Amino acid sequence: MHPDIKGVVELQQLDLQIAEMTKLIDSLPGQIQKLQSQLDNFIAAHEDRKKRLATNQKERKDLEGDVKEIQEKITKHKDQLYEVKTNEQYRAMLKEIEGEEGNIRKIEDQILEKMMAAEEIQKNIQEAAARLDGEKARVAAEIKHMQDERQKDMNEREQLQARRKEVAAALSESVRELYERTRSHRTGLAVAEVREGLCTACNVRLRPQVYNEVRSDEAVLTCENCGRILYYLPPPPAEQAGSGHANADAIA
Ligand SMILES: [Zn+2]
């Protein structure tokens, strides 16, 4: 193969690999961030449940205080029953006590609801607490793994870039410029294989004369349609010979 064509084919492979590597490397901080925020959310939900439990307990205590207050009132009113002078006053007092007892029942229902809610929250807190250390360790290990992978990718990219420098330096200046110019115009793909008379990048048929020149491999040529540098890979001779033989045997 013409050394400049061989060079640009390798250069394109390297550039594609470097671009792929860069995509991976650049995507990692976002992935790490995502993982970290999952853990942060887990911890925040855990803290939120603890706060809700504390609020629940405070509200329950307040309700229990209310019950106690009403009970004291009831006791006082029961004592007053002995002091009333008329049946009317007596009935009114009984009615008041009944109302207060009703209030206590309502508050006790609320307390029961709070207790049930607290039980549920408590259960969730215990579950989260049991998982928390494991989650922290898992996320830390995953982040470490991602960072190691990223470092590996960066090292590999550095090697690819060093190789790219060598390959680019070995090209003749005009071809190097042609490659870079075409690459920037053609979104990364500056080189295209010719197969069965077609440019495989733009699928346009080459003029027979250009096709012959590309196959002769004597000069660097570009596709007249898309401007990419063309190369031609002759079919491997061993395969041809092999299939020929097989056919001959079959006929014999
Ligand atoms: Zn083309």
Image: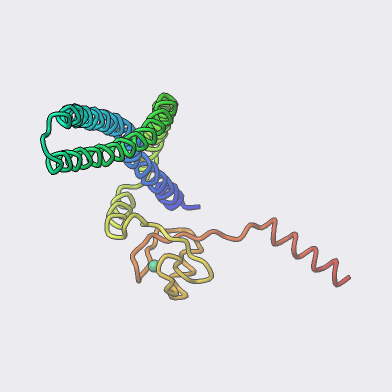
Q: In the picture shown, does residue 162 fall above or below 235? A: above
Q: Where is residue 240, by image quadrant?
A: bottom right
Front in this rendered view, residue 214 or 188: 188
Displayed-image quarter of ligand 1: bottom left
**In the displayed structure image, the side of residue 247 where residue 134 appears, left or right:** left
Q: Residue furthest front?
A: 86
Frontmost residue, 3 versus 109 = 109
Residue 237 versus residue 193: which sits nearer the camera? 193
Residue 245 appears in view: yes
- Residue 129 is situated, as x and y percent measured from the top left of the image, at 40, 26
- The residue lying at 46 percent from left, 66 percent from top is 200
Residue at image point 47% right, 52% down: 2
Asked if residue 58 can be seen in this view, the reply is no
Measuring from the top left, give residue 43's x and y in whole percent: 32, 31
Image quarter of residue 228: bottom left
Q: Residue 106: name its quadrant.
A: top left
**The C terminus appears in which quarter of the rendering?**
bottom right
User: Is the residue 43 above or below the residue 219 in the image?
Assistant: above
Number of numbered discs: 0
Considering only vertical position in the picture, is 210 above or below 154?
below
Q: Give the percent coordinates (x, y) of residue 207.
A: 43, 75
Query: In the image, what residue occupies the spot 12% across and 33% down?
Result: 84
Q: Is residue 251 above or below residue 161?
A: below
* Residue 103 x, y percent position in the rendering: 22, 40
Q: Residue at point 40% right, 49% down?
A: 16
For the rendered model, the colour scheme is rainbow
User: 233 left or right of 114?
Assistant: right
The answer to which of 73 and 114 lies nearer the viewer is: 73
